[in-house]
Amino acid sequence: MILIVKMLGDTNAKRMWDAIIRQQDDLQSSLGRKGKLLYLSKRRGYNEACLFIHVKDSGSVIELVVEHLSKIEGISSLCIAHLFRPRFFPVPKDTYDMKRYVITAKVNPRHFTEVYKKLLNPNLPEGLKRVYYAFTFHSYDDNLQYSFLADNEESAQKYVNEKINTVKGIIIADLHQIERTKAFIPYKEWVKYTSQEESSTPGQYHMINDVE
């Protein structure tokens, strides 16, 4: 399973971000064979760092969080989100110049099934590419997360307004740009982990924004 450890910075997100990267070997050692650090990301406008981790079971992440991440300088709070029914999608090699976005959506509980099926195979407009899609249930206000690439923010926001927020059962969907990503594994290894998560067959593709 894939978990997201979301870390809130006290005042300086860069200090927190740099500290996590410096300590990546120690963090991975604390997981041992129980899991693997995948990548780190940050949403624009948020003083945060989101660490994606593949683990055999959810309990495997507790020592990492309590004994290691919680002690990193600059972190003021943490929470953990679980990707439920995740789907990962292949991204063609010609997308290096595209920006990555994530949609967080609040869905009416009575429409979970219909919304999930509706967005699983959407008719994406030109200039947008899917990355991953999953339930998260990480708060009362957000229970679905959907990441994609877009040529520009205008087309991304138009897609959210016209194709996501109009889906029956979605109460509200918000768009966030991912302004920074740091991969901890090469793409071939990423394929191995995501293929265990009900993923599409990736083929020959690159890791999303694998450099800072």
Image (cartoon, rainbow, N blue to C red):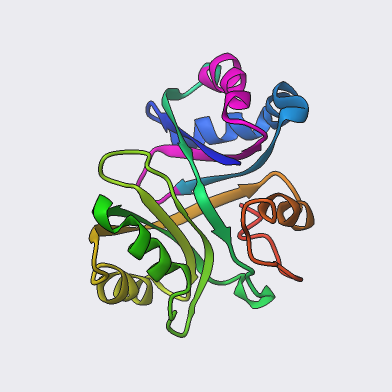
Up-down: is 43 above or below 167? above
Q: What's the magenta region? A: 43-70
Kindly indicate the quadrant of the structure image that contains residue 34. Answer: top right
Name the residue rendered at 34%, 47% in the picture: 143
- Residue 151 picture location, percent across and down: 47, 76
Name the residue rendered at 42%, 74% in the picture: 152
Q: Classify residue 15 as left or right of residue 1.
A: left
**Magenta stretch: includes residue 57:** yes
Q: Quadrant of the N terminus?
A: top right
- Residue 122 picture location, percent across and down: 43, 75
| Count of number-bearing discs | 0
Q: Residue furthest bottom?
A: 126
Q: Classify residue 199 as left or right of residue 154.
A: right
**Magenta stretch: includes residue 62:** yes
Up-down: is 8 above or below 141? above
Kindly indicate the quadrant of the structure image that contains residue 203. Answer: bottom right
Up-down: is 61 above or below 148? above
Name the residue rendered at 63%, 60% in the picture: 199
Q: Classify residue 193 as left or right of residue 151.
A: right
> Is 40 or 85 nearer to us in this picture?
85
Up-down: is 195 above or below 47? below
Q: Classify residue 17 as left or right of residue 56.
A: left
> Is 155 or 32 nearer to us in this picture?
32
- Residue 39 picture location, percent across and down: 62, 45
- Residue 82 picture location, percent across and down: 49, 40
